[in-house]
Image: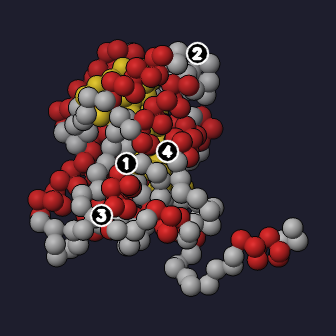
Amino acid sequence: MTGPLAGKVAIVTGAASGIGQATSRVFAAAGARVVVCDVVESARETARAIQEAGGTATAVVADAGSESAVRSLVEQAVALYGGLDVFHANAGITGSAAQGIFDASAQEWVDVLRVNLVGPFLAIKYAAPAMNKRGGGSIICTASVAGLRAGAGPAAYSASKAGLINLVQSACQHLAGTGIRVNAICPGLIATAMTRQWYDEVGMPAKELTQIIPQGRGGQPEDIASVALFLASDAASYVNGHSLVVDGGLTSSVPSAWRLSSTDIQASLGT
């Protein structure tokens, strides 16, 4: 199969649905042999869909926040396909949206940090040696606009994503000269099961939130998958230690009561 990832081997965690599923399909369509991983059995459905579309994929059911599981995941990818070139550390959880700093227990914070921050650390720890044998590679971490400023998610989730953004910068420095690039994607409001759960818990319809996005719509998993493909490919060979915001302009401004209507915008453009 030809494409920008032809001959590459990729791992994607959190691949049973949402961003991880979309990224797995996009990577496979771009020529990669993909190991799709999730803690739930439906990861196998993602692999099956890729295979039916003519791609190459293997499913591994494993916990992306477990050191032994991540070590084994990398070992399996190398054993199956001869090496590793791309690791998209995408698995993540929100915890409960209703849990503020004074509502959540320490264990609830530990649970979120284990998956969202320790998990990507483990991905970097075990993927980098395998990539080094290939002369380089690309590690991509799914962060969030919630890691850039407060108010875009529960406190534990936001803190984990802020830590992840710094982890990406630190890993970039630690891997200097290896040819291994480490970057993050900071999605905004993306239509996934996770965000739908969050909308339900905070009691705010998605339509109300998307009204504050300059692009005029919420994002789709494919919007993030296309950016992940760019970061995984040689087209991004000089992008390293960066956190790329993909949010339709959501974080381009502080909240404001002033906003031109779409009619006024079109009038000012002369259309």
Q: In which quarter of the view is residue 9 placed?
A: top left
Q: Which residue is mark 4?
A: 221
Query: Which marked residue is nearer to the observer: mark 4 or mark 3?
Result: 3
Q: Which residue is mark 2?
A: 1
Q: In which quarter of the view is residue 271 placed?
A: bottom right
Where residue 63 appears, as percent x and y from the top left, is: 22, 37
Query: Which marked residue is nearer to the observer: mark 1 or mark 2?
Result: 1
Q: CA distance from mark 1 to mark 2?
A: 31 Å
Where residue 172 appears, as percent x and y from the top left, is: 43, 49
**Nearest to N terminus: mark 3 or mark 2:** 2
Residue sitting nearer the eye, 184 or 253? 253
Q: Which residue is mark 1?
A: 193
Assess whether mark 2 and mark 3 are in contact (beta carbons under 8 angstroms).
no
Residue at horizontal 76%, vertical 77%?
Answer: 264
Q: CA distance from mark 3 to mark 2?
A: 43 Å
Amino acid type at circle 1 is: Ala
Assess whether mark 4 and mark 1 are in contact (beta carbons under 8 angstroms).
no
Q: CA distance from mark 2 to mark 4?
A: 23 Å
> How many residues crowd mark 1 within 10 Å: few (<14), some (14–19), many (20+)?
few
**Nearest to N terminus: mark 1 or mark 2:** 2
For numbered disc 2, what is the local secondary structure? loop
Q: Which residue is mark 3?
A: 201
**Nearest to N terminus: mark 3 or mark 1:** 1
> How many residues crowd mark 2 within 10 Å: few (<14), some (14–19), many (20+)?
some
**Nearest to N terminus: mark 2 or mark 4:** 2
Amino acid type at circle 4 is: Pro
Q: CA distance from mark 4 to mark 3?
A: 21 Å
Q: Which mark is residue 38?
A: none
Quarter holding the N terminus is top right
For numbered disc 3, what is the local secondary structure? helix
For numbered disc 1, what is the local secondary structure? helix
